[in-house]
Image (spheres, grey):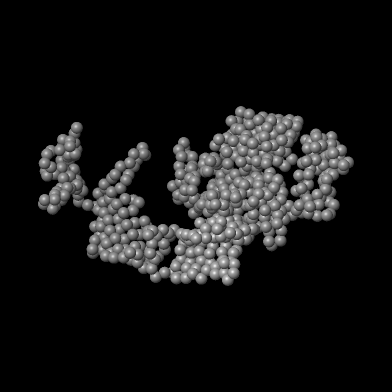
Amino acid sequence: MKAMKLYSGGKVYPLSCISNWCITSSLGGSKTMQFDISPQSPEYRLIAEEERIEYDGTYYNIKSINERRTIATVNAEIDLDELKSKIFSTFKYDTISFVQAMSTALDGTGWSVVGAGLVTAKRSFDLTDVTPLDIVNNCTNKTMYNVSFDVDNIRKILNVSVPATLANNVFFSDELNLKELTFKGSSSNFATRLYAYGKDGLSFAKINNGKEYIDNNSYSDKVIATVWRDERYTKAESLLVDAQEKLKELALPERSYVCEIIDLARLNKIEYSEFYIRLNSVITLIDRRRNKRLEHTVVEIKEYPNEPINNTVTLSTSPEKISKKLIDNATRINQISTTVDKQPTAWQKAIETATALITGASGGYVVLNPSEKPSELLIMNAPDINTATKIWRFNMNGFGYSSNGYNGPFPLAMTMDGAIVADFITTGTLNADIIKAGTLQGIKIIATTGSIAGWKMENGVLVSDDGTMKLDSINNTITVNNSDGNKLMTVSKDGIKFWRGDTEIGQTGIRGGDTGQYGLTFDLIDGDAMTWSVYDKSQKVYVNKLRYTESEGLNVSNNFTCNQLFGHNVTDIDLGNGLHAWGYSE
């Protein structure tokens, strides 16, 4: 898991005690972050508006904080402040290329563009009082250069992408990776015929068989006409090309889908790389409820870094319109927070992954072996037993899977003697008389009664068989008692404390000051003395070497064979009033 960093007061701090963390990326380049954090968290005191957060190669600026009694919701936006550092009182150009527009807009900002050569169109600008960021956003419009940006604000690079013309190999289907589908549709702006005019009444009639209009009846045979005028167009060829693109959207109802998906690529980038979803790409949506197979543009991706199983994708047939709404909404980040815990269990995740694998299978060969009087069923990735590498074998003795051909080995199998062989088993409930394991690794073990390896469980606390040790995971404390059950020592985040019954004698721990220096401390709280002793093996007794009492101060024992302490001469310092301090001199 990549770490999130918070920049505050010139220092960098890890930011980890958060929940409901999501990152929303929208077509055009907008990116926002939202998470919840407890106001009692030590990290919360560092959070303030305009402080910087870094995650996965991107800087964000905190824009709003909504604090309640038990939780605070923090919203941040991708940091593009450097693109707002100057103002163009006028930005007016007649038919310039995308490269020229970006070069002029970004001059002096330290930013650069990668992939600008992908855009060959030329457009005109007539803008006033705009920042470089305003110009960049203007270039994403459908009637301008129709581009999208993947922003790298650490290296100050705008990576250009253009709309995909063909669908990639990614499918959304409830039989594969679609968990939930929300649909919105509207035909209020529907049209099948478009009259288009540019500057000074320019039309494309001369290059369109004398017609000042174009038709698109891909969805309906009706003739529904509308007009589009744009004074920036001075060439009929450009006007015709863009009119065709515009009518392609108008001729279909405006539809958008919010898809809650099993994001296979983000769960396993290596195995499911072909399912990776990108903004501005075209994917195929199989809507079985409406019995339609549709190609839609990805206009928004909402990722949950800690819970990728909850990722959502927004699709639209009208990417320009819906992405504009998304970008506008991004400037007014939603203040409403949700505390609903949607985190699935490992078992649920395994079910969803297995479902995606099985329902998404395609191809394969089913073979009866031998062909006459068969004794087993084979499912293989090739029709020939001798060349197949991935194979399932089903026969009287059991069934198994091998990735090394017909003769195995079979690391996944169930045999007639009741044995199950598997590398990884996920289950909701495991009921067994005996569990044998070399290593038992679990997410969480919950128990209030019972025993583990001779330790009893009492109200969630592990107690040794003789009662002398207790492991309390609720209060994160280890307690050591004597045989009579009286407390002798406790170990916790506060240090090691020593007891006589219910009376705390003293403690040891780590203490530091504002300078950042730390040390080991010994604190006497309710005891008579602190002593440092050495065990005399011949006499089998501890011999007192160093002693401190409230009345005598620090006292060096006469048991030293020489008048030295740690190799140095012992010094008696008379403090007056009968008080002495002991130390050593060089």
* 424 to 200, vertically: above or below: below
Position of the C terminus, as image quadrant, is top left
Left or right, 122 with reference to 47: right
- Whether residue 329 is visible, yes or no, is no
Viewer-nearest residue: 151 or 560: 151
Left or right, 421 with reference to 102: left
Seen from this angle, which residue lies furthest right? 210
Q: Where is residue 453 in the image (x, y as percent from the top left)?
A: 33, 64
Seen from this angle, which residue lies furthest front? 372
Total number of numbered labels?
A: 0
Viewer-nearest residue: 97 or 53: 97
Identify which residue is drawn at 13% across, 49% down. Answer: 536
Q: Position of residue 389 (x, y in %)?
A: 54, 56
Identify which residue is drawn at 57% across, 37% down. Answer: 153
Q: Position of residue 347 (x, y in %)?
A: 50, 62
Identify which residue is drawn at 53% across, 41% down. Answer: 57
* 128 to 67, vertically: above or below: above
* 341 to 168, vertically: above or below: below
Q: Position of residue 336 (x, y in %)?
A: 58, 52
Identify which residue is drawn at 63% across, 42% down. Answer: 29
Viewer-nearest residue: 508 or 401: 401
- Whether residue 578 is visible, yes or no, is yes
Left or right, 94 with reference to 7: right
Viewer-nearest residue: 548 or 112: 112
Quarter holding residue 476: bottom left
